Amino acid sequence: MTNNKNEHIDSMIVCSSGYPTPTDSVCPFVEQIVNAYSQMGIKVTVVAPQSIIKHLLRGTELHPRKREYTYNNGVPVTVYQPYVFSLGGRFGRLNSILRDRAVYRTLKRNKIKADICYGHFWHHAYSLYKYAKENNMPLFAISGESSISCHRIKNNNELAPFIDYVKGLVCVSSKNRDESREKGLLLDEKKCIVIPNAIDNTIFKVYDRTDARKQLGLKDDDFVVAFTGWFDNNKGVQRVSNAIDKLGDFRIKSIFIGDNRDGSGIRPDCEGVVFMGRLTHSQVPLYLNMADVFVLPTLHEGCNNAIIEAMACGLPIISSNLSFNWDVLNKSNSILVDPMNIDDIAMAIKQLKEDKLLRKQMSQHALETAEGLTINRRAERIISFIEAKCHN
């Protein structure tokens, strides 16, 4: 890309906390948007440091340090995953320094150049800052984290020139925009645009429910509750489990897609569980299509991908009445509840179970909402924003 206004972005460097492989579904949302960029003809280089300590102590999968793949005849994507030492949450600043160095050294050693640099969340944008500035590459940040922590890890002397250098900010929700402003990271609202997360509508779509249910031996008249997310307090898996048990209805079945985070030990234990565990990202739509409703009483988000994926499969949503949901959820496609109130969650499940007309109406509105939240459209909007900021 040059300063000519007719030129477009041909290449970018993306930094994120992880990147999936066929056997490890970490950060699938990053892969989806990268794949969409590659299909737009953009050469993407991903840098996603991986913790050697987590591999040694917790058995997390160790990915190749360099690999290349092609998605649906798009431009090949190159992924670098340098090893880093991570020392636990108490050493946040040191972890950040080690990650920043790994990113910088990987890019410098391989002499990678691109039209722009793009950090998937604020702290990864900072990891790119030194290299981007040295090579005169515009830097953009994506804010989708559940809670912004960059300002706590870096001091003001480090942040001030970084914030000034960032060319633009894409937020996945109004909540992230407002939080970025409150934390002093967004000083000029003209630098920011809100573009919610999105789904691959070639995968997440409505299937034949009867055929889908045969996979788990579910009956047509079973009422199935689906949950997708980490089995932790934030996502609220135990609150969903307790709400189902509170209803005491043997006709309610449940699907819990996910796993424990860092050995938390939380497992849903309600009656009627027909599936519990991890799935590959491509398997998730089949299981969502078995369900009647999607429940996620989460406490902290940017913009939750699982909710949008469920809507694309035609599911009414029961989720939190908190600001991170307000850009995509409303009374037409969801029931918003106090995420800590098990009675509220239970009553919302009961209402949708008993009111078939409401369930059908919400399902239709969920589909209509998801139609406007496709990954290709999101990629186009982000690139248009970036190009406009680069040409200013």
Image: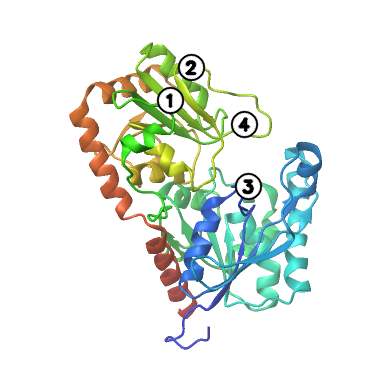
Q: Mark 2 points at which residue?
A: 270
Please name the amino acid that badge 1 sits on. Answer: Ser
Q: How far apart are marks 2 and 1 (CA)?
A: 8 Å
201 with respect to 61 (left or right)? left
Spatial CA distance of label 2 from label 3 is 28 Å
Q: Do the residues labelled 4 and 3 touch (CB within 8 Å)?
A: no
In x, y percent, where is residue 82? 75, 59
Q: Which of marks 3 and 1 is nearer the N terminus?
A: 3
- Which of the 4 quarters of the picture holds residue 351? top left
Q: Position of residue 154 (x, y in %)?
A: 69, 53
**Amino acid at the residue labelled 3:** Asp
> Who comes first in sequence, dot 4 or dot 2?
4
Q: Which of marks 4 and 3 is in front?
A: 3
Residue that badge 4 annotates = 260
Q: Do the residues labelled 2 and 1 touch (CB within 8 Å)?
A: yes
Q: Name the residue under label 3.
A: 24
In the rendered structure, the answer to whether residue 76 lies left or right of residue 332 reads right
Secondary structure of the residue carrying numbered label 2: loop
Q: Do tag 3 and tag 1 residues touch (Cβ < 8 Å)?
A: no
Which residue has dot 1 on it? 254
**Amino acid type assigned to the residue bearing label 2 in the image:** Cys
Mark 4 residue type: Asn
Tell me the CA gap for discs 4 and 3: 14 Å
Q: Looking at this view, is 203 or 50 the one in front? A: 203
